[in-house]
Image (cartoon, rainbow, N blue to C red):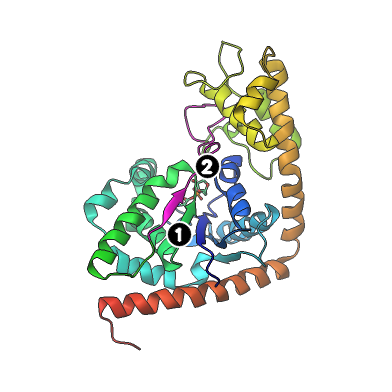
Amino acid sequence: MSDKKTIFSGVQPSGKLTLGNYLGAIKNFQLLQEEYNCIYCVVDMHAITVRQEPAALRRQTLEVLAQYIACGLDPEKSILFVQSHVPAHAELAWVLNCFTMFGEASRMTQFKDKSAKHTDNVNVGLFDYPVLMAADILLYQTDMVPVGVDQRQHVELARNIVQRFNGIHPDTFVMPEPYIPKTGAKIMSLADPVRKMSKSDENQNGFILLMDKPEDIMRKFKRAVTDSDSRIIVADDKPGVSNLISIYALATGQTTEAVEAEFAGKGYGDFKPAVGQAVVELLRPIRTKTEDLLKNKDYLEQVYRAGAAKASYLARKTMDKVYRKVGFVKR
Ligand code: TYM
């Protein structure tokens, strides 16, 4: 690789991708690929920390890969691959387990939330999830990790692990930094704007999927929860409107201030359909391209195979170093 800095990020194939995944993360993956060495992974090993239907997981893994490409990730510029195809992720996770404290892993809010939600399946993998995520990041000597704000704590844990590991075995890992966008880092539910937009929301009106049809997108935006005061401004006590302003700003490439100015004196009757329309136009090419790509499984296979070969090469270099540092005999 050249001396450009390295970017790594991943998305779980645990369902359909949402507008939150796109605006909070994937949109930035694409912007970063021009200036950095970028590695983007479909993290199927993370997905099985909650029960998945095997056929659906296989399909969704290819769908995320297709959506990566449809969102502008270029397999010639970025490494695109599937996590389970590079066994070094699991190998490094094991070593890092031995450098992660039970107490710090217990403090992860996503573990607490998920274990409260899946009380019948609080498995060790769910607890270990952030350590596997640290392995993903550290394996490629990553400088920057573009993520939404909900992943900040996990990147912080990866940083703590680096500090501890490098403290004992100097110069092993690069210290990664989170890259969290100013606008879009936390897109909220359209139905309940104090909660994050999430594909696991029972209320279908709360989230927009990248593959949603235009009429569904329009309907969900028209129904979006706002508040009684009809001013279109960003404010702490107006989470619904603030969220729509962020979405419109990102979809049309403007600042939130410009959006406030555009809709000054107008009401929700003008604003909500305008946001819907902007999102329809934003997602239309992504949806069409994804559908086309999914018809071409051979191409997708070629992309993930080539991606795994390149990723494995880089990962092996780190693993050799790590195994040497911890004292394993060279095989
Ligand atoms: P995942 O699959 O839940 O989400 C993928 C990315 O989308 C972001 N995101 C959001 N951003 C803004 N608003 C939202 N409503 C929203 N919902 C999701 C997430 O922050 C994330 O960036 N643990 C990760 C996957 C992962 C990973 C990694 C990421 C595994 N290994 C290594 C970075 C580096 C996750 O579950 O993301």
What residue range appears in magenta? Answer: 175-196
Q: Main secondary structure of the magenta part?
A: loop
In which quadrant of the rendered image does the C terminus lie? bottom left
- In reply to whether residue 211 is colored magenta, the answer given is no
- The residues bearing labels 2 and 1 have C-alpha atoms spaced at a distance of 16 Å
Label 1: how many Cα within 10 Å (few below 14, some 14–19, many 20+): many
On the image, which quarter does residue 136 sit in?
bottom left
Is 243 drawn above or below residue 142 in the view shown?
A: above
- Kindly identify the amino acid type of the residue bearing the numbered disc 1: Asp
Q: Is mark 2 within 8 Å of ligand 1?
A: no
Which residue corresponds to the image point at 43% horizontal and 66% vertical from the top-left? 141
Is 232 drawn above or below residue 190 in the view shown?
A: above
Nearer to us in this view, 247 or 49: 247
The residue identified by callout 1 is: 143
Furthest residue in direction front, as rendered: 3
SS class of the residue under badge 2? loop
The residue identified by callout 2 is: 181
